[in-house]
Image (tube, rainbow, N blue to C red):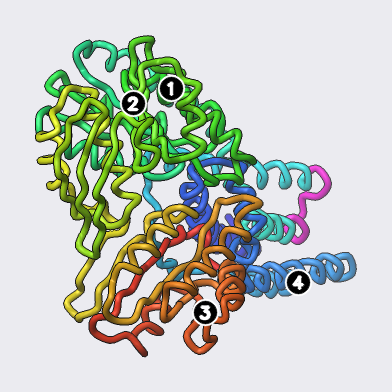
Amino acid sequence: MLNTESILFVLGLLITFGIWGLGTFIRGRFFLHMIQLEEYNNINYLNWIKEYNYRAYSKKTMFSFSLIAIISSIYLILSFFIQNYIMLIIYVLIWTMALLSGINFKKEEAKKDLVFTARAKRLFAGYFVSCGIELLVILAIYLLVSSQIIFYYPVMLFTMALIYFYAPYNMYFGNLLDIPIEKRIHRHYYEMAYNKIRKFEDLKIVGITGSYGKTSTKFITSTILEEKFKNLKTPASYNTPMGISKVINDTLTADYETFVVEMGARRIGEIEEVAKLANPQIGVITSIGPTHLETYKNIENIIKTKYELIEELPPDGIAIFNYDNDYVKRLADKTFKEKILYGMEDIENLDLYAENIEISEAGSTFILKDKEGNSVECRSKLLGRHNISNLLAGAAIAKSIGMTFEEIAKGIVKIQPVPHRLQLMNPGTGVIVIDDTYNSNPVSSKAALEVLDQFKEGNKVIITPGMVELGDKEEEENKILGKNIAKTCDYIILVGKKKTKPIYEGIMEEGFSKDKVFVVNSIDDATKTLQTFVKPKDIVLFENDLPDTFNE
């Protein structure tokens, strides 16, 4: 029969393991969310831990672990002189309360929730395997030294607290364990998609890449092509090998006549990989600029990566370039495949261009022309001059597939704003809202301010956390953004004191009134601040909305 000591030990074991398991699950779920937002990339995830260490190790977590470390040290020292089960029980009770105090039971509000995909579940399992291996190894080593409960049970509890504390790194190790599995799975689905898409010999496939504008161009192109063809496009931001493979395997059938594929990348070689998969006959580069510089390191690497799409086109493929972008122009000039150059400047060298452009708060009108003398008047609900460039890209693609100018114009007038990309909204309060929260970069933020400036009535208000992923240029570009904001806006709300410091400096250098600049901690605080002064006919631009990994 079990004696009292054994019963107490088993009971304590069940309670402490239960609390530790719960805490490890909750803490692990948070880091699973963060690594998912970082696209399961370990380097990006480690950079996040380094930059946002105060989120990985909150004051609550630090206090909890410090208390456990202190009581564990005191107990182990005293146990050399006093071996008392009452002292062990007291230690276990304090440990339990300390660990409980460090668990964040309240689920954080998120802009993009954690999605328990098959990969996320496998990674979560890898995280627990990592935790389990560490615990077993440490206990096995200690049991070789001592088998007395009074010693090894507190050591086990301290080890469990240590594993709980270092959960962010256990998620990293779990991802390392999961990488070989994911590679095999990705390769399987990639090869399935690779073989499937090549069976559709009559399918016209369009690949679109660029530092910015590619998602808008994808939606624009799809709407135009649907005037004549049964078209499929990659949804949302499905622009990675796995995402594109999923669309091909699950959705693409012989019924489709055209397939528009957005191609994203953060590193050299990634466009080549998706281009080899999708096998496009038409390739479009919308723009090149300083985005994702944290991974690309310099603009030359971005240029090289975007051009991988053109290099993967077949000999009879068609390369389409935005000739208004200086970096894209460089690539166009060195390309000897059949090409279409589009833009609004230097029209004598363009194959397709826009003239008589009129832009207002309601959209735009322009005359679409080509070098053969064709022309048609186009009307669009899209805001901003930069969207005319995206419309021209869509028109160039449609023309290359055989659509007439009249068919293209009919498609353009039907195009709706892409959600969260200069999307005009009227919440019914008399205040006009421009939602440009999807992603912000130096070009798109300038375009957004130009759109804001088109409005003639009411105060112009901007709410922004600034721009990220610009590498060494981030501070400089955000300062420029601040200067541009000061020249356009009447009121400014900055979200996040640390991230928006360069913006604030740029604003102040323009002599903007401090009384009309507000720095808040969250979008919720920004909305509350906005309500203190906003009135009907005011225009509010929400410029960028950083993912949860960037929350201060």
Judged from this view, the residue extending furthest toward the right is: 81
Q: Which label is found at residue 310?
A: 1
Residue at 21% across / 22% down in the picture? 401
- Residue under pointer 2: 340
C-alpha gap between disc 2 and disc 3: 46 Å
Q: Nearer the viewer, residue 451 or 7?
A: 451
Nearer to us of marks 1 and 2 is 2
Amino acid type, callout 4: Ile
Real-space Cα separation, disc 1 to disc 2, in angstroms:
12 Å
Q: Which residue is mark 3?
A: 519
Residue type pointed to by label 3: Val
Disc on the earlier residue, 1 or 2? 1
- Which quadrant would residue 122 be assigned to in this image? top left
Secondary structure beneath dot 2 equals: strand
For marks 2 and 4, the one nearer the N-term is 4
The reply to whether the C-beta atoms of the residues labelled 3 and 4 are less than 8 Å apart is no
Residue range corresponding to the magenta coloring: 144-152
Q: Residue at x 52, y 48 (%)?
A: 35
**Membership of 149 in magenta stretch:** yes
Circle 1 SS class: helix
